[in-house]
Image (tube, grey):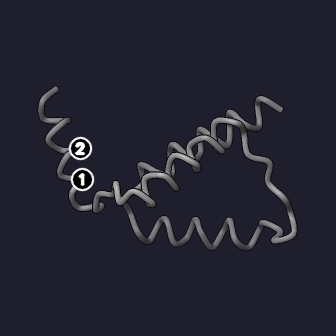
Amino acid sequence: MATVDKLRNGLIDKIISIKNKDFLEALDKLISSSSSESEIVDLTKEQKIMLEMSEEDIQSGNLISQEAMDKRNLEWLNEM
């Protein structure tokens, strides 16, 4: 089962880095058409913790726009 979790987490990491909207829409359609809505997905302990942290950030207003995040990432990359 650890291999499935590794694969899933690797895919999540790759998806997060995709900026092409058309590609993401196509991927969304592919995933939506192949997954069953009644299927229950078991989250790892780490995924549950990350979701709880995200909820806490939302509740406290600790948010940043995608544009601001992109700018911050570019600044960070240029420092390297």
Q: Is residue 74 above or below residue 32?
A: above
Which residue is found at the position 59% from the left and 38% from the top? 10
Q: Is residue 80 above or below residue 40?
A: above
Marking on residue 16 = none
User: For numbered disc 1, what is the local secondary structure?
Assistant: helix
Read off the residue under disc 1.
70
* Badge 2 density bin: few <14, some 14–19, many ≥20, Cα 10 Å: few
Residue type, mark 2 in image: Asn
Who is closer to the viewer here, 40 or 7? 40
Which residue is found at the position 56% from the left and 43% from the top? 50
- Residue 44 in the image: state x and y as whole percent: 72, 39
Which residue is found at the position 51% from the left and 46% from the top? 53
Left/right placement of residue 52 relative to residue 23 reads right
Quarter where residue 61 is shown: bottom left
Read off the residue under disc 2.
73
Residue at mark 1 to residue at mark 2: CA–CA distance: 5 Å
Q: Are marks 1 and 2 in contact (CB under 8 Å)?
A: yes
- Residue 71 in the image: state x and y as whole percent: 17, 52
